Image: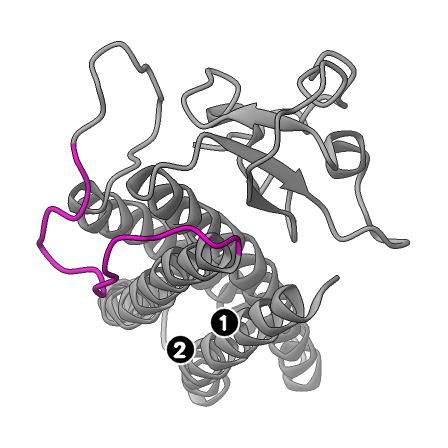
Amino acid sequence: MNDLDSKFKKELDEEDIIFLKEYGKIIKKLFQFASRYKPISVSAMEDEFNRISKKYSQELNKVFKKHSFNCFNMGRLHGKYEVIASGREVKEFKKLKALKLAEPLPPEIDISFWIYPENAMSAISKRQLVLSGNVTQDIVETIKNIMREKIKGADELEVEKQISKTLNTCMDRGELISITESTYYYNKGRVTSFYEDGVEYVQFSAIMDGRTSDQCRSRHGLVMRLDSTELAMNTPPLHGRCRSILKPYFEKPTDKQLDWSMTASLPAGWRTT
């Protein structure tokens, strides 16, 4: 990992730390409420938690969207730094707003995800609205199950243990979301930037260590055209907690670098788009 890559990784890690702090505050508030809550009946408990579910979903959605926009913009900016480092010129960078910063894709290029910034705002908002809603629903349903046991007369100490255990699980899920989503939007931002600045080829770059997955290890160093049909299914993340990125590639690739036939299959049910 060169100095530029190290700098980029540090900035992305710092963004993940910020996200986890904000996510943690919201989740802990919800569990503090659950710990203090004295259910009278199942129906009353259902009504109460259905009421607060919307509130916490909205709070999480704001945090998720902020994290996604930050990672997308960071990816775009870092992508331009790499192109500049190669001695090439880039278009002016502006933070993501409702602006057209890149030309629409030519009709002959069929890529299944958005690649230019004016589509990103809508795509990010829709994805994070669904994600925050799903996370909130899962947490609230788990808490409601614990509360039902409390109503049935479960031991108070056991209820507290279950609440604490669930909180820890939710925080672990937050870390998974943070790393996976930052990789998702960071790479989408990089691809957008490369397209905008005329990069022809991108190279798959994995962090090669003891935690590297088969999916990323088998793709490390491979090269594809930016308009390749392989791009959509090989843009990280390729699995949970994926740390790989796409880098600009300016040399003439070899046949071996362009051969993606021996790459490991993605996890069952995994979608890159």
Rounded to the nearest whole Å, what is the CA distance between mark 1 and mark 2? 6 Å
Task: Identify the magenta region.
Answer: 86-103
Residue 153 visible from this viewpoint: no
**Neighbours of disc 2 within 10 Å: few (<14), some (14-19), many (20+):** some
Q: Is mark 1 on a helix, strand or loop?
A: helix
Q: Based on the displayed image, in which of its 4 quarters is residue 108 positioned?
A: top left
Amino acid type of disc 2? Pro
On the rendered structure, is 24 left or right of 50?
right
First-in-chain label (1 vs 2): 2
Depth check: give the residue in front, 221 or 208: 221
Mark 1 and mark 2 residues within 8 Å of each other at the beta carbon: yes
Is the stretch drawn in magenta largely helix, strand or loop?
Answer: loop
Q: Where is residue 214 in the image (x, y as percent from the top left)?
A: 81, 34
Q: Which residue is drawn at 16% across and 30% down?
A: 104
Q: Which residue lies furthest to the front in this view?
A: 87
| Residue identified by numbered label 1 | 151
Q: Where is residue 119 in the image (x, y as percent from the top left)?
A: 19, 41
| Residue identified by numbered label 2 | 39
| 261 to 137, vertically: above or below | above
